[in-house]
Structure formats: C-alpha cells, structure tokens
Image (tube, rainbow, N blue to C red):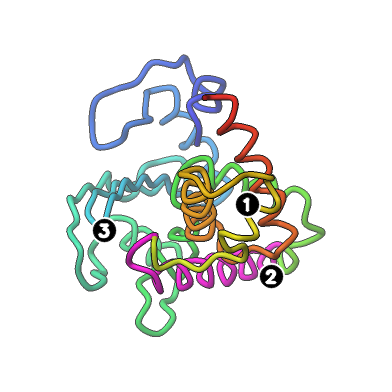
Amino acid sequence: MTDEIFNELTDARRESGPFTLMSPGFTERLRGWSRGGRIAYVEADFWGGNGSQAAALWENGRQSWGPGYASIRVGPPHEDRPINAVLARLGAIGAGALDLFDTVGFGRERDMEGWRRAGLDALEAADYDVWEAACRAKEEADARTAAERDRYTRRDDAPVVLDGRTVMRMLGIPPSPMVGAAIRHLQEVHLERGSLTRDEATAELHRWAQSFRSTR
C-alpha cells in the first residue's frame, strides 16, 4: 500500500491510531472487500530487528479482529504478535522454526521500493509458481552476496581483480595517490555488489577514473 494508492482509494485523509495509513474511507473499502472473503491489513516497521507491528482483520463486511499493535525487540518468534495473530486467523501454518511473518514471505523485502519491484515481477510472471521460483532465486543471490560481504570486516581486506600495476597500465598513470584511491573504490564495489569479473572491474575502473578526474 503506497501513499499514491491510498490517496486513490480514499479521500486522502488519515486518522490517528496504530496504522500510518488508515482513514474512514479506507476502512469502508476494507469492509466492502471483506464481503468477498476475509482480508487483513498489516503494517510493519523494523530497523536492526527492532520495530513495531499493527494488524486488523475484516470478514463479512465487518472488522472481526484488532486493530492490534505491538512494539517489538529482537527475539524469538511470538504467536501473539499482531501480524502473526492475523495470519493464524487466515489459516497460515508455520514452517519449522520460522514464525508466520517469515513463512508467508513478509520478510522477503526490506522497504516499500522492494515490494514495488516484487509487485512488478509478479505482474510479469506467468503464474504463481514462476513468481515464487524467481523470488527464491533472488533470496539465494542476496544471501550469497551477504555472506560474501560478511567475509570481510574491513574494506582493506576485500580482494580486487586488478592490482596496482594493472591499474596504472590501464589508466596510463604513474605511481600516485590515484592508484590507491582506485583500488579502494574497487574494494568498496566488491563489498556492495559481490565479486566482479575482470571485464566488469575494468569497466568500473574507467567509469570511476573519469569521475575522479572530473572532480580534480
């Protein structure tokens, strides 16, 4: 639910309460939708494992549960957390040690922009199984990148494909502070994106050098 969609669906007025996006007009929309089946509205805001959740459930044209709100700190899953409580009422079943929040994929994206991209991917997928497979592939790629990043506690420990001598030859420069700056930049790129091929590192080096020289 983005601000743009909220404004389209309602009169754009917001009411105070546990939800950041809620109004009499939106509540009426949820009531109407629930006549076709149970529907939940949930919000989550986390940073570093701590944050808050809010949730409510509508069915048969009325609000049947909530709104529930809780401040949450890092810790084991809790069935009584608002979103988990709503998901249980919708019939979600936990998978192993995961709580329902993660079982249904709510932890898949980290911000609204991530969910926007996920929505666009879903529109392009032929069916749910194709979309789910794409999501799993993305999660595995993200996990590999995170694991690679965690191998290095300092930028200076990160490997680079191009050494100082190669950088000087490619850029046509003598030994200078620019060589060290180039190496540090490639190390930062490695930590952000993961391992680069030689061709990728070469392209990034020339792109960085052009920007570096333009600021001098």
Would you say residue 141 sits in the magenta stretch?
Answer: yes
Q: Nearer the viewer, residue 22 or 184?
A: 184
Q: Give the residue type that dot 1 points to.
A: Met
Decide whether the magenta segment is chiefly helix, strand or loop. Answer: helix
Query: What's the residue type where badge 2 is placed?
Result: Ala
The earlier-in-sequence mark between 1 and 3 is: 3
Please identify, in this view, whether the residue under mark 2 or under mark 1 is nearer the observer.
1
Q: Which mark is residue 133?
A: 2
Which x, y percent locates residue 37?
55, 51
Left or right placement of residue 17 versus residue 29 in this view: left
If you read the primary sequence from the N terminus, does the residue marked by circle 2 or circle 1 appear first? 2
Q: Residue at x 62, y 50 (%)?
A: 118
Q: Which mark is residue 49?
A: 3
Q: Which residue is mark 1?
A: 168
Total marks in image: 3
Mark drawn on residue 4: none
Query: Which residue type carries mark 3?
Result: Gly
Say what secondary structure mark 3 lies in.
Answer: loop
Provide the secondary structure element on which disc 1 rests. helix
**Percent position (x, y) of residue 57?**
38, 49
> In which quarter of the view is residue 106 placed?
bottom left
The stretch in magenta equals 131-155
Pinpoint residue 113: horizontal percent, then vertical percent: 53, 40
Q: Residue at x 49, y 20 (%)?
A: 10
Q: Nearer the viewer, mark 3 or mark 2?
A: 3
**Is 87 included in the stretch rendered in magenta?**
no
| CB atoms of marks 2 and 1 within 8 Å | no
| Residue pictured at 49% horizontal, 45% vertical | 176
Would you say 187 lies left or right of 118 here? Answer: left
* CA separation in Å, label 1 and label 3: 44 Å
